[in-house]
Image (tube, rainbow, N blue to C red):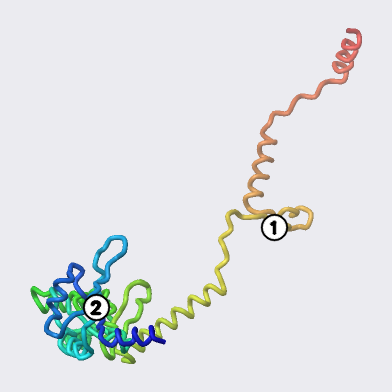
Amino acid sequence: ARRAKAAQAMNAKTIFITNLPFKATEEELREHLKDFGEIAHLKLARDKSTMKVLGYAHVQFDSQASVAAAVDGCDNSELRDRVVRVVPVSRGEKVQFQLPSEIKEDIKGLMREAYEGKNLSTIKDAWQKRHEGKKLDTTRWGFKNFSTAVRSIEDVCLETHHEKKLTFLAFFKDSPAHQAHLEEAQRLAAAAAAAAANPAPEPVEGAKCSEGQVNGIADGTPLPEASADVEASARRSKRSEPEQPATPPQAQRRRTAESMAS
């Protein structure tokens, strides 16, 4: 019970700070938080094998009042090229990254104009063309990639391309374009299921004679055209062979006698 109470008291004085630059140092983080109170302990998370910064830290202050001040004054503040997020550890809150409202409205505006149902790369390129010299790097606000950032926009959803399964398309939820996409996806799924249930017969490698063709002479079934041609050719060849003259009976008896005498 004592350990639990001690841990609870410690957590009440601790903040969790994330989306830190990967090149951030402890000294840099202390400088960033110095206006909010006395820091008792700071632990910058690092990879155990490489010792590289993982992008988050726990900071313990001397008082709970410093925690509230740090959350109010440091959350969504900038450190180098990142917008850091700060939450109190005692609440067990999960950090929810958010795009700036102006970025959200820009993306929605593009979708309303002509880009609903387009892939995310097309939308991102369109935004950057309209903001010359700027790069829409959503990792700045804590997102792993552009798709996770777009998912956080209210009333916007992502659907998978019908053919390119790794490509996402942006839609307004329940819009006519969204409904049409879902209906087409259902139609394609039903067609694929029907094709799987009734596969097409495999092509036959070679023609096979039926029983009637094999026994055509016996049962009166006409022979295949190719077989008839072969038979006719054989008959013509046989007729073309010269016939051997018949041996006269007297000559045959003389030959027989000679062979017996020898």
Residue at disc 1, secondary structure = loop
Give left or right: position of 17 versus 203.
left
Instruction: Tell me which corner region of the image, top left, top right, bottom left or bottom right, holds residue 181.
Output: bottom left
Q: Quadrant of the N terminus?
A: bottom left
Q: Nearer the viewer, residue 164 or 25?
A: 25
The residue lying at 74 percent from left, 55 percent from top is: 216
Q: Which mark is residue 210?
A: 1
Residue most toward the left? 133
Q: Which residue is mark 2?
A: 18
Q: Residues within 10 Å of mark 1 (few under 14, many from 20)?
A: few
Above or below, comparing residue 81 to residue 248 in the picture: below
For the question of whether residue 135 can be seen, the reply is no
The amino acid type found where label 1 is placed reads: Ser
Rounded to the nearest angstrom, the CA distance separating label 2 from label 1 is 77 Å
Above or below, comparing residue 193 to residue 106 in the picture: above
The picture places residue 159, in percent across and down from the top left corner, at 34, 81
The amino acid type found where label 2 is placed reads: Thr
The picture places residue 68, in percent across and down from the top left corner, at 20, 90
The picture places residue 65, in percent across and down from the top left corner, at 20, 91
Residue most toward the top? 262
The picture places residue 98, in percent across and down from the top left corner, at 23, 85
The residue lying at 52 percent from left, 74 percent from top is: 195
Q: Nearer the viewer, residue 117 or 3?
A: 3
Q: Indicate which disc, 2 or 1, sits on the residue closer to the N terminus.
A: 2
